[in-house]
Image (cartoon, helix red, strand yellow):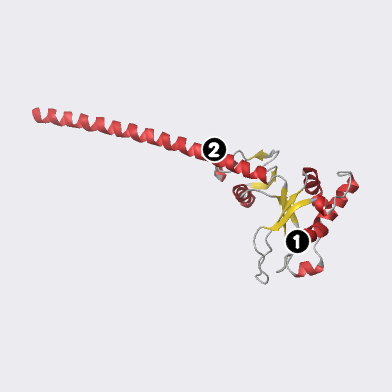
Amino acid sequence: MSVVKDKVVTLEKLMTKVELLETKVNVQEESIKTLTSEVTVLKEKVNQLEQIQKGNAIRLYGFPGSNDEVGLATKVYDRVLKPILTAARAKGDIPTVPQINNTVEGVFRAGRFAAGSGKPPPPVIIKFSSTSTRLAVLKNKRSSMPAPTEGEKAAGIKRFVIAEDLTTPTYRKLQELLKDDRVVKAWSIGGEIWFVTQGENVRPKKVRSIFDPIDKILS
């Protein structure tokens, strides 16, 4: 009986240790969850601040490049921005078509152009002088975007595309949604992503956190 009793006592001690270990593990898991949540919140705040800094800019895709990009701002203004702003003026969206020095603060490539590489030219980032001009361009881009010339088409330029200048995490999440078969369409407004999924009478939904997994966003 003594031997059995000793074994029971030993077993009880082991069970107590196991319970203590399980408690510690649970506490650690909760701490990890809390820290993970706090990190996500910080990442979201940093991303929001970066997006605010990009609030007066857009990206122009498909604009042809050259080894010598001196005068890029003038080329972009004359080739793309001015025609769109002229259409905006005709519709009454803006009072006048602003000159280039009153339109943009800065124009530059988001990467180096490599002639003869066969790759599409890097997008052009355009920072506007005023919010109203930027909004006029975004509003009229679809209906008044100039088409590429025959020479530009021969060089592989299919079309010009204007989009918001998104942060890298936001852009990646938007592309992830666009590639998902469950998503009919996705777009950004003011740096926030909206999307529509398959189904009848489906209303647009906003991505609450770009750091959520795609399945959680679409659930």
> In percent of the image, x 65 and y 44: which residue is there?
51
Locate residue 135, reporting x and y percent: 78, 45
The tag earlier along the polypeptide, 1 or 2, is 2
Residue 198 visible somewhere in the drawing = no
**Residue 72 disc label:** 1
> In percent of the image, x 42 and y 35: which residue is there?
31
In the shown orientation, is residue 58 left or right of residue 35? right
Locate residue 65, reporting x and y percent: 72, 65
**Total residue callouts:** 2
Classify the position of the N terminus by image quarter. Answer: top left
Q: Amino acid at mark 1?
A: Leu
**Residue position for label 2:** 41
Residue 104 visible somewhere in the drawing = yes
Q: Nearer the viewer, residue 109 or 147?
A: 109
Q: Secondary structure at mark 2?
A: helix
> In percent of the image, x 42 and y 34: which residue is there?
30
